[in-house]
Amino acid sequence: MNKNQILSIAAFISCFMIVGQRNVEAQSKEANLKNWPKGTSPKEIGTRVANHFIVTPHTNFNRPGPPKVITYPETCAWFGALTFAKQSGNKEMVKKLADRFEPLFGEEAKMLPVPDHVDYTVFGSVPLELFIQTKDKKYLDLGLSIADKQWAPPEGPRVKPESHEFYNQGYTWQTRLWIDDMYMITAVQAQAYRATGDVKYIDRAAKEMVFYLDKLQEPNGLFYHAPDVPFFWGRGDGWMAVGMAELLRSIPKNNPNYERIMKGYKNMMASLLKYQADNGMWRQLIDDPEAWEETSSTAMFTFAMITGVKNGWLDKEVYGKAARKGWLGLITYINENDEVREVCEGTNKKNDRQYYLDRKRNIGDLHGQAPILWCATALLR
């Protein structure tokens, strides 16, 4: 081999290495969860959506007039706004969110939900977060009373025969085996653990999660809306995705249920990757290419992936890219009033594909506003 041939080969190898390095850099940029184009950063978007929540009166599932009690979508948005305020270092926002709570100790006390159903018990996550941030014991007392009530003996008009069976097996009597339970139950119990360090709360939530995974997760990693309704409804699965991510974020690795929950979570995330649209969105029915792109589920899946990447559970390149696409796609649905569009209305189960495709698409529904705040928080962690 002469000198010219050697130089040519060296030049080729050098060129190949430069191109390869550029490809790696390009991949890393696509998976980057820190640097954002102007106007798209989690701090900018989170501030807009949180400030909108602060000035929004108590909501009533998009019906006119105030609710009788605080609804679970408001709870989810309130919790999201609080965690965002903390991660963004916005103490003024924390104060405003605490001020919103203060009437519940007085003239609005009747609006405190009775913790006899998962949709009401999840409210406890808000006072527990306020305690974590302010150290005011009145929030802790209220939050723990709600968390403890969930595992107390069954009582009240909502008790069913199976409630006693679940309780006797060590589960909450509020168990329904509905997929949204796995956020509603997990959120308050994980918060009680974060507020106190008492492992009984996280142990409860982990045991419950494994019960639901074993009963409800399909072989492809996703979850039917109900055992008798074989449709992968976006937001229904979103509750499972967020619930597992929130639980894994705090559960000690030596917990006997840790590995089972991590397996369920990773199986779900791998399946979701296959169904993400090119623009980053997921659909009203996850595996139906004719279903419309839906924002609340997209935000929930994006949160779960952000959390996995940030904690090292998921491949940074593969899932970082999906999470970035999800965030950038999602925020294009936020209008000039800081309200997210294309949010599926509250949806009961029905064994009818067209029923899901025809669901009303709300604007500014807190089912959609809340997980945007969760995403913004997760991106800042």
Image (cartoon, rainbow, N blue to C red):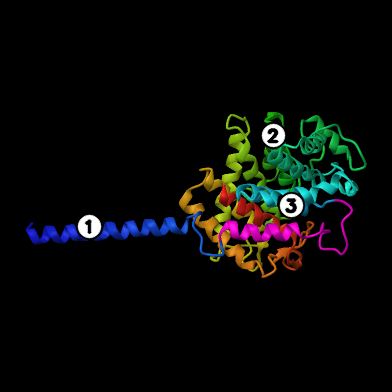
The answer to whether marks 2 and 3 mark residues whose Cβ atoms lie closer than 8 Å is: no
SS class, disc 3? helix
Residue in the foreground of this view, choosing between 285 and 323 = 323
Q: Which mark is residue 13?
A: 1
SS class, disc 1? helix
Say which label, 2 or 1, has the lower sequence index: 1
The answer to whether marks 2 and 1 mark residues whose Cβ atoms lie closer than 8 Å is: no
Say which label, 2 or 3, has the lower sequence index: 3
| Quadrant housing residue 123 | top right
Q: Amino acid at mark 3?
A: Lys
Q: Residues within 10 Å of mark 3 (few under 14, many from 20)?
A: some
Question: Any magenta on residue 274?
Answer: no
Residue in the foreground of this view, choosing between 188 and 45 = 45
Residues in magenta?
A: 41-69
- Gap between marks 2 and 3, in whole Å? 25 Å
**Residue at numbered disc 2:** 193
Task: Name the spot of residue 376 as percent of width and height, x first.
Answer: 61, 54
Say which label, 1 or 3, has the lower sequence index: 1
Q: Amino acid at mark 2?
A: Tyr
Does the image show residue 372?
Answer: yes
User: Residue reaching furthest right?
Assistant: 157
Q: Residues within 10 Å of mark 1 (few under 14, many from 20)?
A: few
Q: Residue at x 68, y 62 (%)?
A: 284
Residue in the foreground of this view, choosing between 287 and 155 = 155
Task: Name the spot of residue 179 as percent of width and height, x first.
Answer: 72, 48
Instruction: Name the front one of labels 2 and 1.
Output: 2
User: Residue reaching furthest left?
Assistant: 2
Task: Name the spot of residue 344 as percent of width and height, x first.
Answer: 73, 63
